Image (tube, rainbow, N blue to C red):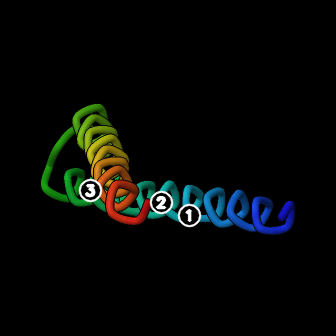
Amino acid sequence: MQEIIMARVIIVLLTVAVVVVFALLVAAAAGTLARLDGATYPAALMRAAATFAAAIILATAVASVLTQYLS
């Protein structure tokens, strides 16, 4: 029983890590594209931060919906 709980914890932690890495990649791409579009460094950083937050919020919303259906 304890092995099953430990496996679930590991799966959750790995999933969270993948989501954070994906959000960082998307934010970096958004910041780079904003900078290439002529935005200043602070403006590009703000776009990247907003994109990172949006990706995390979207992942949280998807996880909450999936939790309702899978449990």
The residue type indicated by label 1 comes to Thr
Q: CA distance from mark 2 to mark 3?
A: 16 Å
Residue at x 65%, y 66% (from the top left corner)? 11
| Marks 2,1: beta carbons within 8 A | yes
Residue 56 coordinates in the image, percent (x, y): 37, 47
Element assignment for label 3: helix
Question: Label 2: which residue?
Answer: 19
Q: Nearer the viewer, mark 3 or mark 1?
A: 1
* Neighbourhood count class around disc 3 (C-alpha, 10 Å): few under 14, some 14–19, many 20 upward: many
> Residue flagged by tag 3: what amino acid is it?
Ala
C-beta proximity under 8 Å, tags 2 and 3: no
| Residue that lies at the very extreme toward the left in this rendered image | 37
Looking at the rendered structure, which numbered label has been put on residue 65? none
* Snapshot quadrant of residue 49: top left
Q: Nearer the viewer, mark 2 or mark 3?
A: 2
Q: What residue is pinned by disc 3? A: 30
Where is mark 1, residue-wise? 15
Determine the image quadrant of residue 4.
Answer: bottom right
State the SS at label 2. helix
Q: Residue at x 44, y 59 (%)?
A: 71
Mark 2 surroundings: few (<14), some (14-19) or many (≥20) residues within 10 A: some
* Amino acid at circle 2: Val
